[in-house]
Amino acid sequence: MFKKVPAALAAGLLTLVLTACGGGDAGSGGGSDRITLGFSQVGAESGWRTANTKSVQEAAKEAGIDLKFSDAQQKQENQIKAIRSFIQQKVDAIAFSPVVESGWDTVLKEVKDAGIPVILTDRAVDSADTSLYRTFIGSDFVIEGQKSGEWLVKEYEGESGPVNIVELQGTTGSAPANDRKKGFGEAIAADPKFKIIASQTGDFTRAKGKEVMEAFLKAHKDIDVLFAHNDDMGLGAIEAIEGAGLKPGTDIKIITIDAVRDGMQALADGKINFIAECSPLLGPQLMDLVKKAVKGEQIPQRVLTEETTFTPEQAKTALPDRKY
Ligand code: AHR
């Protein structure tokens, strides 16, 4: 476990360690000065999540941080258990991507009482007491929803309605589901021709996206647009649309969020029409923040991820270099 020591004493100890090891690398030697980070991941529900896990694991290795990784399988109770176990193991810092926004105050108070800094990654919590965590690194999901809605408004500019939209929401109660819905709704609100005729969760998975889209297609014969809160649900929905004998991207316009490789390929192929990017590559910045938080250094309360949007043409250009 990493312990804060006065600078002069630290310098003395470092000299001692280097002398004793004959000049070895004290920073990556596996001694007690290595930071241990407990990380509770949401699960493995999407291509985005897989890329995010890889980014965190690789960055920890690169930064010489010992990572205790726990997969919550999309269950809040598993995340709470993992966090309590990290406290017992006396880790130096805890990072987690909260599966849902609410219900974290009790466990976060326990972490605070144990003196362990917490970093939220990817998803926010709705705790009123922001002293329960040191920082939150991740995307602005409201903006992602807004960009998606703004594209739609432009696409149907000058056309008469109605434009019937179905929505595949992310995990119920999660920050990206709440915020993307909000941002999209705000962007299309000014024009009453846009109507969300059905909206249901697909839990951010391809299988659920397909299942719910099949139900939408049975219930509604007049769907113009699908807004899916992530690529995976959109890709599942494409299978359902093709299964119903329709052409995705043409008979039903499709907007998704993430821009993972499979989504980008479908966009390049014309099966998706627009993607708002959500970057999963949070690992390196997270490790920097962990190091600073453990040393007691000042860090910003919010670290925002930079993101763009993609049309089919832009996807074709970006695909060869896409890392995930
Ligand atoms: O929290 C980020 C979201 O979670 C991604 O958009 C989605 O694919 C993932 O499962």
Image: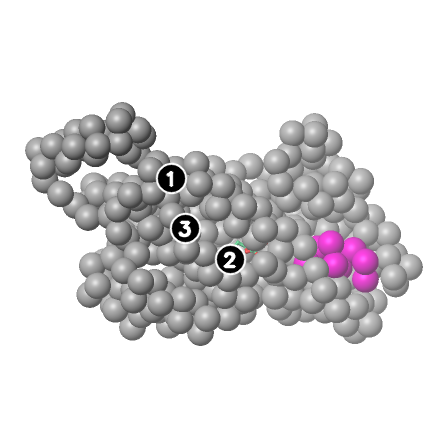
Which tag is nearer the camera, tag 1 or tag 2? 1
Say if disc 2 is inside 8 Å of ligand 1: yes
**Quadrant for the C terminus in the image:** top right
Segment colored magenta:
233-240
State the SS at label 2. helix
Residue picked out by circle 1: 64
**Alpha carbon of mark 3 to alpha carbon of mark 2: how far?**
25 Å
Secondary structure mainly formed by the magenta segment: helix
State the SS at label 3. strand
Q: Position of residue 250 (x, y in %)?
A: 83, 48
Tell me the kind of residue under disc 3. Leu
Residue picked out by circle 3: 67
How crowded pointer 3 is (Cα within 10 Å; few <14, some 14-19, many 20+) is rated as many
Quadrant hosting ligand 1: bottom right
Q: Nearer the viewer, residue 110 or 131?
A: 110
The picture quadrant where one finds residue 264 is top right
Please check the rendered image and state whether residue 228 is part of the magenta-colored stretch, yes or no: no
Left or right side of 177 for 96:
left
Please check the rendered image and state whether residue 238 is part of the magenta-colored stretch, yes or no: yes
One can see residue 242 in this view: yes
Residue picked out by circle 2: 176
**Alpha carbon of mark 3 to alpha carbon of mark 1: how far?**
9 Å
State the SS at label 1. loop
The picture quadrant where one finds residue 117 is bottom left
* Residue drawn at point x = 61 percent, y = 60 percent: 45
Q: Position of residue 40 (x, y in %)?
A: 43, 59
